[in-house]
Amino acid sequence: MSDASSAKPQPLTLSGIQASGSLHLGNYLGALKRFVAGQHDQPTFVFVADLHAITVWQDPALLAAQTREIAAAYLAAGLDPKSAAIFPQSAVRAHTELAWIFNCVARLGWLDRMTQFKEKSGKHKERASVGLYTYPVLQAADILLYRATHVPVGADQKQHLELTRDVAAKFNNDYGAPAGQPDFFPLPEPVIQGPATRVMSLRDGLAKMSKSDPSDLSRINLLDDADAIAAKIRKAKTDPEPLPDTLEALEARPEAKNLVAIYAALADRSEADVLAEYAGQGFGAFKPALAEVAVHALGPVTAEMRRLMNDPAEIDRVLKDGAQRAAAVAEPVLAETRRLVGFWNA
């Protein structure tokens, strides 16, 4: 019997970012900074989600380049590869095998309720790939393969994590666990905390900042230089009123709220503290201050990303080592899952 069958799940953090398009400020604040903050608290596994990326067509050459770019962003943001395992999702094949097992555990009704599929497929559901539809099941496999207990997610991913908990509970109910042991798969908890966990578009305070938005002015890319950052903030949509002096008044003004939240997150201050300094001032004064904070915070990350991307061999060494470390954790879990399901093992 594998060690995975008898060991109680230990606290472990796992997350990843899809390998499609360039990373932006929302990825940095909503994911990268949080990965870095928790990497020494407990074992941390951070992957590049290239399997998820191909749910829509990707140029193969670009996919490989984007995998390295995201790994460079992880490292530039402060992830220590000696502490956190950084790897491409596809390099650990147990992800796909466990996903198939979970496809046979998950129910169609659960997937029909996933709002992200409805948003991404739009009016042409029949043209969407099966992979896009079953995306949350692969996500469940990503998480449960490492028996992760804590998953940093954006608010928009909470529904997917709830499905992961449903898959884990049904598997535990259907297949049990080794005699005398607790349920095999833990029910992971979402970690949704901190400022700017959902960064909005610079052109629409009601829409999430996205790599897929056709307007480059809607986002600050991690590879943007200081001039580009300042120009995008200067052109960011706002309203004509000065900044209010209370958080309650800010709630009704989505574009203003977004810019204040970005300032607070980049400067490691509270939104209330930012308002205390800038209340009553117009955006003509606030935007240059925000640009200065953004350039100061992102400049070192951008410079290190560019350095790493000029040395792909260094990135590849990190990814190979991370994949080996991840597989060492994943394979015993998959082996015990196979045994519980009843698969033949040589």
Image (tube, rainbow, N blue to C red):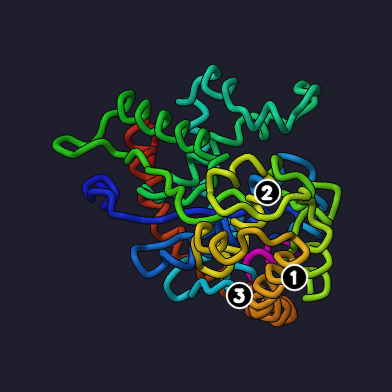
Above or below, 346 against 245 in this view is above
- Which quadrant would residue 41 be assigned to in this image? bottom left
**Residue 254, labelled with which disc?**
none
- Give the magenta part as a residue range: 65-72
| Residue 308 coordinates in the image, percent (x, y) | 68, 79
Please give the residue where the numbered disc 1 appears in the rendered image. 288
| Residue 250 coordinates in the image, percent (x, y) | 60, 47
Circle 3 packing at 10 Å, graded few (<14), some (14-19), many (20+), is many
- For mark 1, give the secondary structure: helix
Residue type beneath disc 2? Met
Q: Nearer the viewer, residue 344 or 173?
A: 173
Above or below, 121 against 96 in this view is above
**Looking at the image, which residue is at 57% across and 22% down?**
113
Please give the residue where the numbered disc 2 appears in the rendered image. 200
Q: Nearer the viewer, residue 278 or 312?
A: 278
> Label 1 near label 2: C-beta < 8 Å?
no
Please give the residue where the numbered disc 3 appears in the rendered image. 76
Q: Nearer the viewer, mark 1 or mark 3?
A: 1
| Residue 296 coordinates in the image, percent (x, y) | 65, 78
Q: Nearer the viewer, mark 3 or mark 2?
A: 2
